[in-house]
């Protein structure tokens, strides 16, 4: 049974469970407080804190895990990044008080104090840009540090940046773009690696399908020269003769969900009829 470490709570846990459910790997558990559960026939889930997952996987307690890339980077453990799962997107940024006089990374003086919950990520970044700073590890509430005189700048995680602005802080630069990832132990055996390869393909097919729609329409034959501009699809639209061999053909294509309204309008302008839009469960190129 291949072990997968999963977040035990929070938004990351909810999104991970939803992805597994869509991939046909619903978590079978008798209690919300259970520490382990079955995932299909091949996998066993282990529920732990997101920040502990890199350690569990790297130490071999789990063969794979789902956690944020920010936490993997901070752990500095050797892991294989198998798949970007498309949720939990955020950034690790450098920020300073609006009234600090620090308007860019180049304004940070050597010896400045940097408060952060990501001391390893911060230390590597400032070493890379050649700025010698004192990293001050904190466990939370990083935004308050510059206002209390604890630090000159901070390194913190943001989604939209609104929390920084609300606390009188300005972004100076992005250190790292993060999202939820499927990570695996690079030293797992061949049989386990094969199972994890299949898992990655399974999850990727669901991730690719999200945000896409399948469009079908009966389009006049004389409009086929222009149809590719309306529904380009993955490798071009599929065109199928209709049984009655009339003036219409059936056109099928994959379209981004955000473009559906425009696509329908464009199809109607070409004289299309019987337009059908449906969700896609799995998609692989």
Image (spheres, rainbow, N blue to C red):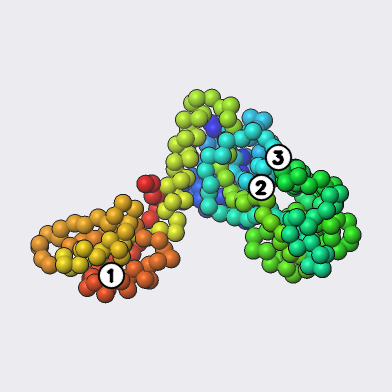
Residue 143, quarter of picture: bottom right
> Picture coordinates of residue 53 (x, y %)?
66, 40
Q: State how far apart marks 3 and 1 are (Cα).
A: 51 Å
Residue displayed at 77% across by 50% down: 117
Q: Say whether residue 95 is visible.
A: yes
Q: State how far apart marks 3 and 2 are (Cα).
A: 9 Å
Q: Which residue is mark 1?
A: 267
Q: Which residue is mark 2?
A: 70
Q: Please, is residue 228 above or below residue 189 in the view?
A: below
Assign a secondary structure to mark 2: helix
Q: Is residue 33 left or right of residue 109?
A: left
Residue displayed at 64% across by 63% down: 160
Q: Between residue 276 and residue 123, name the one nearer to us.
A: 123
> Picture coordinates of residue 220 (x, y %)?
18, 68
The mark total stands at: 3
Q: Are marks 3 and 2 in contact (CB under 8 Å)?
A: no
Q: Between residue 262 and residue 57, name the one nearer to us.
A: 262
Circle 2 Cα neighbour tier, 10 Å, few/some/many (<14 / 14–19 / ≥20): many
Q: Are marks 3 and 1 in contact (CB under 8 Å)?
A: no
Q: Which mark is residue 21?
A: none
Residue displayed at 47% across by 35% down: 197
Q: Is residue 191 left or right of residue 212?
A: right
Q: State how far apart marks 1 and 2 are (Cα).
A: 43 Å
Direction right: furthest residue: 149
Q: Which residue is mark 3?
A: 75
Residue displayed at 83% across by 53% down: 109
């Amino acid at each position: 049974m291949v072990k997968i470490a999963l977040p035990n709570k929070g938004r990351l846990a909810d999104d991970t469970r939803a992805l597994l459910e869509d991939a046909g790997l619903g978590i079978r558990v008798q209690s919300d407080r259970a520490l382990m559960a079955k995932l299909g026939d091949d996998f066993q889930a282990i529920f732990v804190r997101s920040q502990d997952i890199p350690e569990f996987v790297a130490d071999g307690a789990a063969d794979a895990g789902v956690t944020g890339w920010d936490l993997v980077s901070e752990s500095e453990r050797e892991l294989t990044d198998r798949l970007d799962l498309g949720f939990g997107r955020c950034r690790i940024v450098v920020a300073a008080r609006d009234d600090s006089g620090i308007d860019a990374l180049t304004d940070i003086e050597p010896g400045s104090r940097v408060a952060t919950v990501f001391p390893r990520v911060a230390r590597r970044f400032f070493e890379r840009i050649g700025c010698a700073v004192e990293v001050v590890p904190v466990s939370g509430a990083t935004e308050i540090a510059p206002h209390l005189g604890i630090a000159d700048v901070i390194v913190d995680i943001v989604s939209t940046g609104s929390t920084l602005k609300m606390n009188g802080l300005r972004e100076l630069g992005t250190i790292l773009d993060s999202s939820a990832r499927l990570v695996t132990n690079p030293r797992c055996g061949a049989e386990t690696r094969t199972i994890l390869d299949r898992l990655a393909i399974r999850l990727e097919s669901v991730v690719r399908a999200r945000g896409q729609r399948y469009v079908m329409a009966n389009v006049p034959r004389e409009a086929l020269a222009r149809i590719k501009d309306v529904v380009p699809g993955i490798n071009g639209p599929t065109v199928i003769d209709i049984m009655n061999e009339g003036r219409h053909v059936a056109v099928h294509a994959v379209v981004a969900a955000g473009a559906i309204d425009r696509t329908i309008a464009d199809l109607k302008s070409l004289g299309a009829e019987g337009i059908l839009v449906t969700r896609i469960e799995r998609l692989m190129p």
